[in-house]
Amino acid sequence: MKQDALDYFLQALGILFRVRRIYPPGTKQVSQACRLAVQRLADWGQPVRMTLLGADTIVQDRKMEVLPSAFQALFQSLQQSGCESVHIETDAGEDDLAAWMEHVISKDRGSYRSSKIVAGALNLEKHPHRPSVLAQTIAGYLELSSQVQEALSVLEGKKTEGLVRAREIVRSIAARLVVGKEFFQPIHELKDFDDYTFTHALNVCVLSSALARSLGASEELVNMISLAALCHDLGKKQVPKEILNKKGPLEPNERILVERHPAYGAKLLIGTPGVESDYPLLPVVAYQHHMGADQSGYPRLSACLKPHKLHSASLLVAVADIYDALRTVRPYRPALSVAKASTILIKDAFSGRLCRDYVSALLSLLEVLVPGRGVILSDGSHGTIVETGRIHLLNPIVRNEEGRLHDLSNPSAPQLSEVKEEAMQSFHTQD
């Protein structure tokens, strides 16, 4: 059986580790152990990926409930050295395995990279020496997007291993957001990227994580919201691609299918072992993220049911979801600029469709409504923000063309209506 071939390779790695701890490098015993491991890898015939995350150990898409004694010592050594991920190419040879094993034996906590084996702590950069921070971040982002595809594909099969993969991604995102806001750049640079489903899931996860963190949520809650954001659109798997990618308007029956995806996603997640007990927020966000703060969206509640308060995480993810969807090329329209996307968020906030506090927080995070930004007010007048809102970002102080100041927090003042395309010069707004 194919799975047996993988187990035999893992056992051979464990034997190599055990032998190398006894015998010096280059001895006959070590060479024989390397040869056996290479043979077992060839029998498996695929790259091998191992993830060590806390108490969880994942090999390929299988969670190892019990580590076989043959390679238990190797895995424990990897964990102790801070190694969280190992990727071994199919054609790794004896020299490749021997060199990596020397690194493991040395208990070096640094990452290990060769043309055939990459091992170390979870991170976004898989390839060194990139020409710029932007290129480095985008390349890492695309690598993470492929991991999202893998994790969500496993989750679609209701496998617990998909949750562990998703947690790994959330952890990587959290680590990057602590470093600085350059991690937002790919969200704006990759608006033409073809693989919308998985890139969108990643973008919404990044935005939701940063938004929750900026609002002072606990680390535990930030991670839970991030995981829910990553899985929010799982139900779209049940909607035919020709409908999701249709260039023209949807027919009524097609729209019904699209509007069922939140329910599909919630049902899928509830049916995944461990979700209800450990991650109860996931199906809630999947079901509610299109309902709208005013519950004007979908799924629509039966008329006999009283409106109920939506979970704050659903309202937060909804803001990130709509912003990223607006900023991305879709079959039926081009990507909108930051200014146009922000304008739509502002209008939805004032209409009650989106939570005003979360829209305000996101636009603050993205540095949209800052002094010097040109805006249009609800009375048709044009102006420039001179001071951000003291209480609420959506109520800044604006100087109009006649030099008159408007404090938009004043009930008699006009409302913010539109963000102008001009003067959008902050770090993330290259359209």
Image (spheres, rainbow, N blue to C red):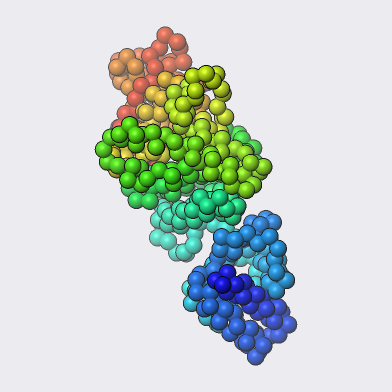
Whether 159 is drawn above or below 236: the answer is below
Does residue 73 appear left or right of residue 382 in this picture? Answer: right
**Which quadrant is the C terminus positioned in?**
top left
User: Can you give x and y, in whole percent of width and height, for residue 194 in the image?
Assistant: 34, 51
Extreme residue in the left direction: 248
Mark yes or no: residue 230 visible: yes
**Which quadrant is the N terminus positioned in?**
bottom right
Q: Residue at x 44, y 27 (%)?
A: 297
The quarter of the displayed image where residue 32 is located: bottom right
Give whichever of 399, 341 is nearer the camera. Answer: 341
The quarter of the displayed image where residue 26 is located: bottom right
Whether 228 is drawn above or below 109: the answer is above
Give whichever of 172, 72 is nearer the camera. Answer: 72
User: Can you give x and y, in whole percent of width and height, for residue 333 in the image?
Assistant: 28, 38
User: Can you give x and y, in whole percent of width and height, for residue 294 in the image?
Assistant: 48, 22
User: Can you give x and y, in whole percent of width and height, for residue 130 in the image?
Assistant: 42, 61
Q: Residue at x 55, y 27 (%)?
A: 310
Whether 159 is drawn above or below 318: the answer is below
Mark yes or no: residue 208 visible: no
Give whichever of 284, 384 is nearer the camera. Answer: 284
Tag count: 0
